[in-house]
Image (spheres, rainbow, N blue to C red):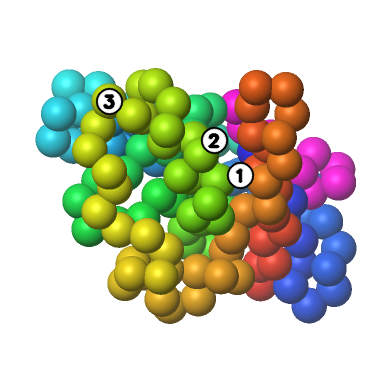
């Protein structure tokens, strides 16, 4: 993923912001909860933005769990203050394509698509990652405008 953090009023990149992400694994399990309660570190990470405001992450395509569409949680910290808390989403057509492959295809069909998700309904279209295929992987990108 390529998450660019910019000042919402000037669109200038913010260097040194801490971008924190977490998401479910292919089985729909979060670290620290339920089946993942014995570990608090998998599918979680923090990166600092570079001089162009960019934070880069390498992870797996998130899994799903009952009642929610596929998403990644994100929090942005600037100068020790939380300036953004939200979720990032994926186009349903891309998720459908990924979930036809193993290990995702070992699970039943997901129960909730973007249009049916109660959190996505509150502005999720503005938090949709732009995906592009690079070899056998996807690169998701978005600019996150924050107010300091």
User: Is any atom of residue 47 visible in this view?
Assistant: yes
* CB under 8 Å between discs 2 and 1: yes
Secondary structure predominantly adopted by residues drawn in magenta: loop
Name the residue carrying label 1. Answer: 18
Rendering coords of residue 40 (x, y %):
29, 28
Give the SS element for disc 2: strand
Of residues 45 and 95, the one drawn nearer to the viewer in this rendering? 95
Is 131 left or right of 94, judged from the image as shown? right
Looking at the rendering, the stretch of residues picked out in magenta corresponds to 48-58
* CB under 8 Å between discs 2 and 3: no
State the mark number for residue 106: 3
Indicate the quadrant containing the C terminus: top left, top right, bottom left or bottom right: bottom right
The image quarter containing residue 58 is top right
| Mark 1: few/some/many CA within 10 Å (<14, 14-19, 20+) | many
- Residue at x 36%, y 22% (from the top left corner): 103
Of callouts 1 and 3, the N-terminal one? 1
Question: Relative to residue 55, is residue 80 depicted above or below?
Answer: below
* CB under 8 Å between discs 1 and 3: no
Q: Residue furthest left?
A: 34
Question: Relative to residue 26, is residue 148 depicted above or below?
Answer: below
State the mark number for residue 142: none
Name the residue carrying label 2. Answer: 46
| Mark 3: few/some/many CA within 10 Å (<14, 14-19, 20+) | few
User: Is any atom of residue 31 visible in this view?
Assistant: no
Q: CA distance from mark 1 to mark 3?
A: 35 Å
């Amino acid at each position: 993923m390529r998450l660019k953090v910019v000042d919402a009023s000037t669109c200038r990149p913010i260097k040194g912001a801490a971008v924190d992400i977490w998401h479910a694994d292919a089985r729909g399990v979060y670290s620290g909860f339920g089946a993942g309660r014995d570990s608090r570190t998998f599918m979680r990470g923090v990166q600092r933005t570079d001089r162009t405001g960019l934070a880069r992450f390498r992870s797996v395509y998130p899994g799903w769990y009952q009642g929610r569409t596929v998403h990644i949680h994100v929090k942005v910290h600037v100068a020790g203050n939380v300036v953004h808390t939200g979720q990032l989403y994926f186009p349903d057509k891309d998720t459908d394509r990924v979930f036809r492959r193993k290990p995702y295809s070992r699970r039943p069909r997901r129960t909730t698509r973007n249009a049916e998700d109660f959190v996505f309904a509150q502005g999720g279209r503005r938090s949709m990652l732009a995906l592009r295929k690079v070899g056998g992987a996807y690169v998701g990108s978005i600019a996150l405008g924050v107010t300091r």
